[in-house]
Image (cartoon, helix red, strand yellow):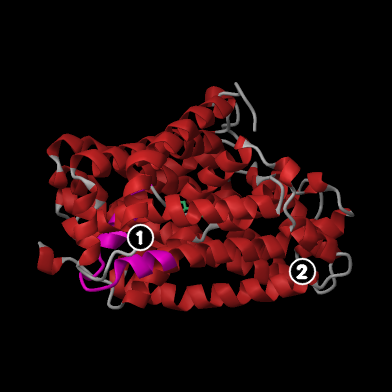
Amino acid sequence: MEEQRSNFSSRLGFVLAAAGSAVGLGNIWRFPYLAAKYGGGIFLLVYFILLVSFGFSLMIAEIAIGRKTKLSAVEAYGKLDKRFGFVGTLTSLVPMIIFPYYCVIGGWVVKYFIAFITGEAGAAAQDGYFTNFITQTAQPIIWLVLFMGATTAVVICGVEKGIESASKVLMPILVLLSVIVAAFSITMPGAWDGVLYYITPDFSQFSIKTVLGALGQLFYSMSLAMGIMITYGSYMKKDADLESSVKQIEWFDAGIAFVAGLMIVPAVYAFSGGDESAMNAGAGLMFITLPKVFAAMKMGTLIGTIFFLLVFFAALTSAISLMETVVSIVQDRLKWGRIKATIVILIASMAIALPSTLGFGIWSHITPLGMSLLDFFDFISNSVLMPIVAFLTCIFVGYFIKTKTISDEVKLSSKFKQEKLFVIVIKYIAPICLIVILVSYVMIGLGLISI
Ligand code: PHE
């Protein structure tokens, strides 16, 4: 088995592919919103501290599990300790649930990119444009098929020829485009106050909610607890420096999130005349507020087009990592070839994606826990399954296979400089934080508390 497994050809390829997974819709629409909401600079500071401790340790653990076992998530846990085989199964459910609905949103991004490039930017800024679009039946499905098709085309080509090559092209372009949009945004008239609002710490806003918000965001943003980093780790060569790679992925992800804030916060701030409520979360910000901001901007159509292209690249590389994780799970379990596995997953994922998109239109009467179907899938995967998986992973590494197993794997390729930090976070700090996240997310989801 071991010799046959595909590999990333270079460490750079691995880092760019993993960063491609980490940098996604979460960095672009959720991070700026959270930073603006939770006191600007203070949120950035809390996020930074959690990134280099919590995020670092969990990512090291996942990549090392993958590289050690050379297996996907579904088999990796069980191979190291039979009693934990069920965690592999739980982890595998996460990308299977997320991939279909992530492609629905990816399809919306493609639609907006095409609208902007074909001169429909003005229409996209009108009230009702977004709602009118997502409540239709056929239109969103067409864009979903296009987005999922593009993802499949890369995954079917394999780890080196598909994922690594695509990441090497897309990620540098993504950085360049982000810098262009941010530079344009912060030099707009009236934008500077928005920049200050974004980076100046407002200590009065600091509370346990800041920490919770930052922790939840971090965990999702770094693509942890979805089996993705285990899968990508399994394609990493034994002599590639694991610790430095994790640091680079971390910085890439945080850097893009920070720049996304510079693209969005000042522009929205200037547009709304300092009205903070314009910085709403989720779909509303990206698909309703921003098109209005672009419509009011000089050269807004061009900047909007570049913006949606970069969001498309960010979403595509994340979707690729999700699909690849599912493909590797099916390949490991059923011993199928890549092409067969990819095609079967494409068909199954299309079928699972349909309820998410129809849930805004003809199926909008189906509202489990009071949520739209897309939000419901998102809730089950992100708020319930992911914290449980991450918690069990910490217990697994900290108390069953022991942190030494991971440290030994890291040390195959370099010294493990921050080993002490890693051990303390995995054994003591992360499990507690994850229980707090799980309980509070479920309570928020059920509407018992709000943050
Ligand atoms: N990390 C991605 C982001 O920040 C989210 C993601 C989700 C990536 C699912 C892959 C899979 O948007």
**x 18%, y 44%: residue:** 401
Residue 34: give x, y in percent of width and height.
65, 48
Residue 36 percent coordinates (x, y): 72, 50
- State the SS at label 2: helix
| Mark 1, secondary structure of its residue | loop
| Residue lying furthest top | 448
Q: Residue 257 carries which label?
A: none
256 up-or-down from 341: above or below: below
Q: Is residue 61 magenta?
A: no
Q: In this view, does 276 lie to the left or right of 139?
A: right
Image quadrant containing the N terminus: bottom left
Q: What stretch is highlighted in magenta?
A: 225-247
Tell me which residue sits at (29%, 74%) in the image: 160
Amino acid found under the numbered disc labelled 2: Ser
Give me the residue at 22% from left, 65% from top.
411
Badge 1 amino acid: Gln
How far apart marks 2 and 1 lie (CA) works out to 38 Å
Looking at the rendering, in which quadrant would you find the C terminus?
top right
Q: Is residue 163 above or below residue 36?
A: below
Q: Residues within 10 Å of mark 2 (few under 14, many from 20)?
A: many
Residue labelled with disc 2: 185
Q: Of residues 73 and 349, which is closer to you in this image?
A: 73
Instruction: Residue at 72%, 53% (x, y): give it.
Output: 201
On screen, residue 36 versus residue 414, left or right, reads right
Return the x and y of residue 371 as percentages of the image width and height. 58, 29
Q: Earlier in the sequence, mark 2 or mark 1?
A: 2
User: 234 or 203: nearer the eye?
Assistant: 203
Quarter residue 307 falls in: bottom right
Judge whether residue 307 can be spotted in this image.
yes
Residue 418 — which label? Answer: 1
Q: Position of residue 405 (x, y in %)?
A: 19, 52
